[in-house]
Amino acid sequence: MDTYKTKEIAALTGVHPNTVRFYEDVGFITPPKRLPNGYRVFTKLHLRQMELVRVALRAEVLQNGLRKKAVEVIRFCAALDFEHAAGSAREYEAMLEREAENAKAAVASVESMLNSSAGTDTSLNRKKAAEKLNITVDTLRNWELNGLITVRRTQNGYRVYNSTDLERLNIIRTLRCANYSLSAILRLLNRLDAGLIAPVEEILNTPEEGEDIVSVCDRLAVSLENTQKDTERMIAILNEMKARYSTIQ
């Protein structure tokens, strides 16, 4: 049986030796046997577990319990409970599929809004606008502070939201509910304001060169697709380990 020292398994999986020890401490890998001198002895089982951990934690999308579910898969695998690990991985895969569907549905909704005719003339204060959109006043204020919308004021200083403002806010709300970032939404709105035509999904998932910091949800669809591919790899690793190590308890 091939065995590895801490430094060796760290080198093989592209991490620092302290990371290997950390994964052991937090229950991400099965505790290795130790020699009389205290040195850890890792096997191919640990090598595969390390690979699983690295792939699972590479996930960029973390919302709606996704990271928690990925960690659940890791812990079941470390406990050599491959049946439950595989079950959790399939649940994780289904969660990602729902997130991807929500992201696509939001894009379709926005495209429909952009192609629809303007609504009737409206004049609402901030509280009424928030109630109509089913969001909090603080959320509305946050969107304004982040430059997603600029609202005209009356002579006494109160903000007044018209039908155009509400249509814009509805677009923002739809995309935020699907976990698109404020930066991605602002990118889309700026392009729309400038009259630049391009598919909505393309704009949302293509950060511009001038954007200094790009977060995961600035390219949500791409991040979800990458994570779905990683999940397929996780399931393949688990199936392999289940076939080889199920008798180890």
Image: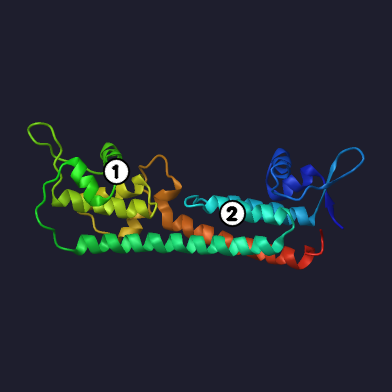
User: Is 178 rendered above or below residue 90?
Assistant: above
In this view, 49 is above or below 20? below
Relative vertical location of residue 94 with respect to residue 192 in this rendering, above or below: below
Between 79 and 217, the one nearer to me in the picture = 79
On screen, residue 137 versus residue 163, left or right, reads right
For the point 77% across and 42% down, the residue is 7
What's under tag 1, amino acid-wise?
Answer: Thr
The percent coordinates of residue 95 (x first, y second) are: 50, 60
Residue 100 versus residue 92: which sits nearer the camera? 92
Does any portion of residue 229 appear in the rendered image? no
Residue at the spot 12% in from the left edge and 37% down from the top edge: 153
Circle 1 residue? 136
Given contact means CB atoms under 8 Å apart, are the residues at marks 2 and 1 in contact? Answer: no
The N terminus: image quadrant: bottom right
In the orientation shown, which residue stands out farthest toward the left?
155
Q: Amino acid at mark 2?
A: Ala
Dot placed on the residue nearer the N-terminal end, 2 or 1: 2
Q: Which mark is residue 176?
A: none
Question: In the image, is 70 to the left or to the right of 109?
Answer: right
Judging by the rendered image, the residue that carries numbered circle 2 is 70
- Foreground: disc 2 or disc 1: 1
Relative placement, left or right, of 151 versus 137 is left
For the C terminus, the quadrant is bottom right
Badge 2 element: helix
The crowding category of the residue bearing disc 2, from other C-alpha atoms within 10 Å (few below 14, some 14 to 19, many at least 20), is: many
CA–CA distance in space, label 2 to label 1: 31 Å
Q: Report the residue at 38% width, 47% height from top.
A: 181
What secondary structure is found at the residue carrying circle 1? loop
